[in-house]
Amino acid sequence: MTAIPLIIGLVLGVAVLVGYVLVLVGMRQEDRRMRLVDVPPSRAAGLARRVTGCHVRG
């Protein structure tokens, strides 16, 4: 019975780690000149914009 909380904690930890890596990858794909276009260059960049709250209005 004690293995179930450990497995749930491990799965949640891995999910948080994967999300963190995706946001980091998306942030690296953004334009280096600090100008955002209305369409992000990739899905990871779109996720990074959504998580960080950096939206562009068209």
Image: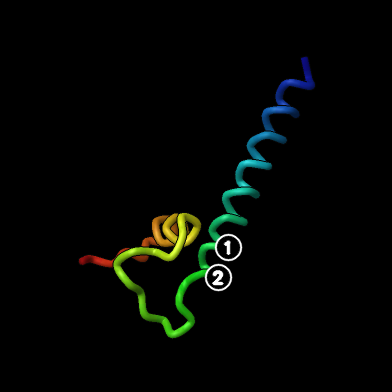
With 48 as the anchor, is 8 left or right in this view?
right
Tell me what residue is drawn at x 58 percent, y 63 percent: 24
Q: CB under 8 Å between callouts 1 and 2?
A: yes
Q: Amino acid at mark 2?
A: Arg
**Percent x, y for residue 51?**
44, 56
Q: Quadrant of the N terminus?
A: top right
**Percent x, y for residue 11?**
67, 34
Q: Secondary structure at mark 1?
A: helix
With 14 as the anchor, is 37 left or right in this view?
left
Q: Residue furthest top?
A: 1
Disc 1 packing (10 Å; few <14; some 14–19; many ≥20): some
Q: Which mark is residue 47?
A: none
How many marks on residues?
2
Tell me what residue is drawn at x 65 percent, y 49 percent: 17
Tell me what residue is drawn at x 41 percent, y 61 percent: 49
Q: Secondary structure at mark 2?
A: helix
- Say which quarter of the image contains residue 33: bottom left
Q: Which residue is mark 1?
A: 25
- Say which quarter of the image contains residue 2: top right
In-front residue for pair 30/12: 30
Q: Which residue is mark 2?
A: 28
Disc 2 packing (10 Å; few <14; some 14–19; many ≥20): few
* Up-down relation of residue 23 to residue 37 (above or below): above
Q: Amino acid at mark 1?
A: Val
* Up-down relation of residue 14 to residue 27 (above or below): above
Tell me what residue is drawn at x 63 percent, y 37 percent: 12
Q: Quadrant of the C terminus?
A: bottom left
